[in-house]
Amino acid sequence: MDKGDKIKGLIAENVNGDNIITRARYPHIFEEGLNKSVVEEISEIKGEPEWMRRFRLRALEIFNSKPMPNWGPPLDIDFNKIRYYILPDEVKARRWEDLPEEIRETYEKLGVPEMERKYLSGSVAQLDSEGVYANIKKKFEEKGVIFLDSDSALKRYPDLFKEYFFKIVPVMDSKFSALNGAVWSGGSFIYVPENVQIDLPLMTYFRMNMQQEGQFEHTIIIAEKGSYVSYIEGCTAPIYNVTSLHSAVVEVYVKENAHVKFTTVQNWSRDILNLSTERARVERGGRMEWVSGSLGSKITMLYPSSYLVGEGASASHLSISLASDFTWKDNGSKVIHFAPRTSSKIISKSISLKGGTTVFRGLVRIPKGSVDCVSHVQCDALILDENSRNFTFPHNEVYEETATVTHEATAGKIGDEQLFYIMSRGLTEDDARSMIVLGFLDDVMKEIPLEFSLELNRLIKLKIAEMGGTG
Amino acid sequence: MALTLELRDLHAEIEGKEILKGITLRIEQGQFHALMGPNGSGKTTLSRVIMGDRRYKITGGGIFLNGEEITNLPTYERARRGLFLTFQNPVELQGVKLFTFLRSSYLVHYPNDGRSFQEFITYVQSKARLLNMDTTLLSRGVNEGFSGGERKKAEILQMSLIKPRIAIVDEIDSGLDVDALEAVAKSLKDTIYSEPRMGVLLITHYQRILKYLSPDIVHVMIDGKIIMSGDYSLALKIEEKGYEWIREIK
């Protein structure tokens, strides 16, 4: 049997849930379910040091002891029905034809460039960008930048890795951080030395010859004093995963006067639960920017956090989420102002249509003693039809009277007068709706990567066209 | 072929209340009609019904373009066939840049326009300057935070770019001071009389804008009906005597 057939079989099996046949044919594929031996086997296959093996086992115990969150969207997960590790080679060799039809159709309609399709198929794009990649890599390496997948980083820089692994996100943070601790695989590891400015954004696109993405990746970014790095995860390719649960952990360490921009864009297929933990620790004068765009998945729970621990540190959280077709986007931001004169800005834009639910949860905490802090929270929701919903739960805890905290929230629908006005200029109703939605997003669009905003643009038009005359 | 808009015994209501009570009117491309009348007579309703505002229900009669009925045609189809409406209080489109809006609507009407993006910018800027319009407005959201005068200018800018065949101009003079009125009237005139000439139904409460524009025909609308039509002297008479005398003779 050639590799293509094997992969097809693997994917078909996961899509259909018919694992008996596959198990017989491919004995090295992990069984569903999570227990001590699965965790030990993952560690062994990866050839990890003893401390990591023990860490994983401890995380498993924590995972088992933690309850499911008692808030948020309805999470109906059977942890015994999930496969926790798939050998990277088999994941990488996905083909365009192996994607679910729904995703393929969407991308056909969107006219995703041929190049991306080839990238997706894992056959061409890596070669296409090899030259570019090699140059960038060389330039960075000369400056001491590390950009590796996390598994390789653990092998090559064990001490550095250990120093930052599960530190700002404690493994006992939640059931899902513990799950990541037990079965993590892949992710990016980025180390930027003092005063090194990386002028090009690092993307998962460039992290080649490695596992492109996993379901439980663990990403660590360390920006030393005065450095700058922008990292983009996800990009425009539809990220397809053979299992239904994605639970990543992202840890960002922003040292004095360093600046990190972390952009995550996801367009998971509609059977994925995306439950990830992202957190940054920002020291004196440092700046953290989170930009997130969330289009796909069945349920997303994502609340990037910034812990502003040094005087004058700042954080910016920008998010766009679109929930359609009865999906649920539970997004938010958390900023804790541990130090004086720290500032934060949270802007959330959410769009619900075709029965989608968007939720914003925000937490801003300014403890006593953190003088002269400034925080601005803005959450805007646009609801496109009667079947769709938005909920907003802002939470501000301010214990310091010198703080300036402002909060704005709007929830709106598309007005008949706006539609009439635009249509009176000759644009169709669908075009009028798209125009209003894109206008709603305008002030955050410029912050997101161009490829993503183009895709968002196209996707919104597509979804609105699908809505037809319901409005 | 020149376009002709006809309203035949048009009746329309909103929320069960009849506003238009049998309007019959024929406007040919190249003609300049003024529609005058007191507040609440149904002038703005008429403009919206012609353009196909779905919030109004047509309860009788019909709207025709060159003899073809368009009473149930969607708004954008009417626009594509050459009708245009300038709004009395144009709505704000948050985040939709005026320039983007102009370009999108322009390309609907002129899909084969050969101008490059840069050339189009230059073209729009030159049109805006003719209106004494602040060109920085082009990079703001449509009508977002615009003053009354800026909104009116933006309406005329759109009209001058799209060059409709028949335009309904609804109270373009409301809320303008004398200088702004003169500027708006002048550019309106330039737009209307540029070749090929437009047909115009100019709706106004007051005569003051008409002295810059000299319409061919003046109609008076009271309580949902056009009760008198005449030449420009009718407008002057209304300026002098108000609307009461018309009510009395009817």
Image: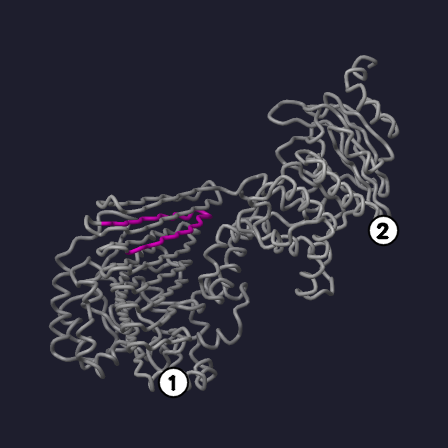
Left or right of residue A421: residue A67: left
Q: In the rendered view, does B245 fall on the left or right side of A61?
A: right
Residue nearest the observer in this picture, B143 or B185: B185
Amino acid type indicated by mark 1: Lys
- Which stretch did the figure color magenta? A342-366
Instruction: Reply yes or no: does residue A130 show up in magenta.
Output: no
Which residue is found at the position 72% from the left and 64% from the top? B115
Q: Quadrant of the C terminus of chain B?
A: top right
Q: Nearer the viewer, residue A246 or A289?
A: A289
Looking at the picture, how far across and down is residue B127, in whole percent? 72, 54
x, y percent for residue A167: 18, 66
- Element assignment for label 2: loop
In this rendering, the answer to whether B212 lies above or below A234 is above
Q: Secondary structure at mark 1?
A: helix
Tell me the residue at 28%/45% (across/down). Answer: A395
Q: Which residue is mark 1?
A: A139
Instruction: State which quadrant residue A7 falls in.
Output: bottom left
B2 relative to A458, above or below:
above
Question: x%, y% of residue A3?
Answer: 37, 82
Q: Residue A346 in magenta?
A: yes
- Place of residue B77 in the rendered image (x, y in percent of width and height, measured from the top left): 70, 46
The label on residue B195 is: 2
Q: In the displayed structure, would residue A138 be above or below residue A337? A: below
Q: What is the chain identity of the residue bearing mark 2?
A: B
